[in-house]
Image (cartoon, helix red, strand yellow):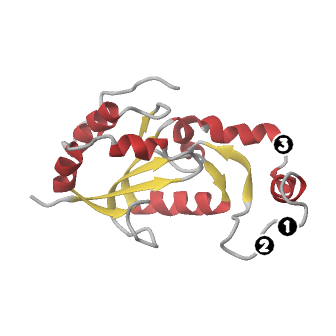
Amino acid sequence: MSRITFATVWFGGCSGCHMSLLDLDAWLFDLASKVELVYGPLADQKTFPDGVDLTLVEGAIANEEHLALAREIRRKTRVLVALGDCAVTGNVTALRNLAGDPSGLLQQIYAERGDPTLAVPRAPGIVPRLIERVTPLHAAVPVDHFLPGCPPSAPRIRAMLEALLAGAEPSEIGRFG
């Protein structure tokens, strides 16, 4: 039996969804027999590969790097899942929207409220430019499935993955929060 290609991505969030994924414990061996992990925080892949069968995205879209990667992931992924409340609704990450215009936010965080001798790092690749508003994943790209929860529990993640790996629609809709 051939394995499907599988990716996980972490945008603006706390990594709690990936921690729940790791809470699958021994079932991770079953998962590994059915998927080939091709991208994720636990893999050392620098570019998102072409032709990924299933991608789980944790976190909200908070900066230009997230937005560009979300678009790339959508182009290269057959089934895209928004995993957890930050990806589904923006959740805690979207609280940044209450601060208003993000242009002065990094200056405020790095210089005004931090060490006053520090400035915002401006070298490319150090601090990505913040987008105007933090958004859930579906506001940036079409999403095939949503699994809310903060974080979703390991049994709920497993139920969703088992359904998707069997080629079925996940029956778990769950709750928000």
Disc 3 from disc 1: Cα separation:
21 Å
Q: Residue at x 16, y 55 (%)?
A: 33
Quickly name the residue at label 3: 100
Quadrant where the N terminus sits is: bottom left
Residue 44, percent from left and from top: 40, 70
Quickly name the residue at label 1: 119
Nearest the eye: 106 or 61: 106
Q: Is residue 159 left or right of residue 85?
A: left
- Point out the frontmost of discs 2 and 3: 2
Tell whether label 2 touches label 1 (CB within 8 Å): yes
Amino acid type, residue under disc 1 in the picture: Ala
**Residue 144 visible in this rendered orientation of the protein:** no
Amino acid type, residue under disc 2 in the picture: Arg
The quarter of the picture where residue 48 lies is bottom left
The quarter of the picture where residue 121 lies is bottom right
Quickly name the residue at label 2: 122
Disc 1 from disc 2: Cα separation:
8 Å
Amino acid type, residue under disc 3 in the picture: Gly
Q: Residue at x 53, y 37 (%)?
A: 88
Is residue 11 placed above or below 175 in the rendered structure? below
Residue 57, percent from left and from top: 46, 49
Disc 2 from disc 3: Cα separation:
21 Å
- Point out the frontmost of discs 3 and 1: 1
Q: Is residue 97 left or right of residue 166?
A: right
Nearest the eye: 105 or 3: 105
User: Disc 2 or 3, which lies upstream in sequence?
Assistant: 3
How many numbered discs? 3
Residue 95, percent from left and from top: 71, 37
Q: Is residue 85 left or right of residue 43?
A: right
Q: Residue at x 70, y 76 (%)?
A: 124
Tell whether label 1 touches label 3 (CB within 8 Å): no
